[in-house]
Amino acid sequence: MKRELQWRHFKALNQLYINQYTNAKITDNGYIANVLITQKKLLKFKSGNNKIIEATPKYLSFYDQNFKQDFEQYTRFLQAMDLEDDARRKYTEYDIQTLMFISEYKDELLKNLTTIRIFSSEVFKTHGSKYLENKPGLKSAVCKILGIDDFPDKDPKNHQWRLVIDSPAPTAIILCENIAHLKSPWKIRETGLELWYVGGNNIGIIDFISPDKLKFPIYYSCDWDFHGLSIYSRIKYKMKQKSVEINLLYPYVLDLAIPVNSDHHNSNWNFNIPLSGLNQADYKEREAKLINQLIKENKWIEEESMDILELFKYNTSS
DNA sequence: ATATTAGAAGCTGGTGATGC
DNA sequence: GCATCACCAGCTTCTAATAT
């Protein structure tokens, strides 16, 4: 079960680590209630008082392994940015990681700052275009990090961000439709992979890849929906003109497919034309087969739901 | 350890405007 | 006419501070 913790949950878990007890209300969280309390029995209610939660001895080592580093990293970040770090802030872990991402790429994001809607849908991808404006607390944190009072009313004419995880000694380059995989750069840096964000009509950025890097194998990681795959076709064409080959990363598990009409997803298949109108020649046999299957079931596979390193390994080991 | 309180933030649901 | 959206006020939830 994936942990989906808010900041107050992190604070309370840390309190349990330091004091072995807390009276914070954290059983509303499924991961804490089901996994930490019921399943693993690392935490329990104080006998005779169900308002207080106590830690068991085993909890301490579990916290060491699973939470300590993350919590310290997040706390250091919030303090460094001069953001409130008390438990009333309703940041989720995803929010904090995204704020760290924004801070990392601040200069580049500021160069071509978009409207709050576009910014939200690209940077807070899975939560949609109105996520940020509906959360004043989070929005002010973003503005503070960027050093702005508000977002512009209009998009810049040429909205391109050079968002890249550079590698000093790259062995392969992966172009990513979404920034999700760029949000944990420390995991990528050790691997020799270089990640480039090419989503949101950002494919002009390919021209900035230095020619000596184009000799490495180049892959494309995307949502397997009509939008993501049609960008692949455009990139493939662009690369062909440079005589460079690019390959699509094929999902390592197919049961991650979810219905096309899920929340904040806005890319539909066209059932009336073959392969939804995608250029058949751009796809290998098994790729076309998967696309046809997704069209038939009216589903898509979200890039973010896969681990990029596993995805890469799956596609390169044979 | 427990109870009380204030402040902050999000949620909810009504309202009116806008667009198809 | 129906659906969607922005806006706003009032309500709820939660923490932190303080007192007992």
Image (tube, coloured by chain):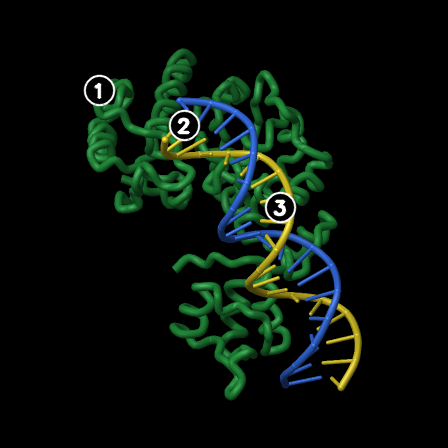
Chain colours: A green, B blue, C yellow
Q: Quadrant of the C terminus of chain A?
A: top left
Q: Which x, y percent locates residue A243?
A: 39, 14
State which chain disc 2 sits on: A
Q: Amino acid at mark 3?
A: Leu
Res A104 quadrant in image: top right
Res A231 quadrant in image: top left
Of the residues under marks 1 and 2, which one precedes in the sequence? 2
- Say few, some or many: other residues with alpha carbon within 10 Å of mark 1 (under 14 / 14 to 19 / 20 or more): few
Q: Is the same chain shared between marks 1 and 3?
A: yes
Left or right: residue A42 compared with residue A311: right
Residue corresponding to mark 1: A273
Residue corresponding to mark 2: A218
Q: Amino acid at mark 2?
A: Ile
From this view, report whether residue A217 is shown above or below residue A89. Answer: above
Res C14 quadrant in image: bottom right
State which chain disc 1 sits on: A
Of the residues under marks 2 and 3, which one precedes in the sequence? 3
State which chain disc 3 sits on: A
Give the CA separation, mark 2 to mark 3: 36 Å
Q: Amino acid at mark 1?
A: Ile
Of the residues under marks 1 and 3, which one precedes in the sequence? 3
Mark 1 or mark 2, whichever is nearer to me: 1
Residue corresponding to mark 3: A138
Left or right: residue A154 compared with residue A187: right
Q: Quadrant of the N terminus of chain A?
A: bottom left
Depth check: A111 or A308 in front?
A111
Q: Is the same chain shared between marks 2 and 3?
A: yes
Q: Residue at x 31, y 37 (%)?
A: A260
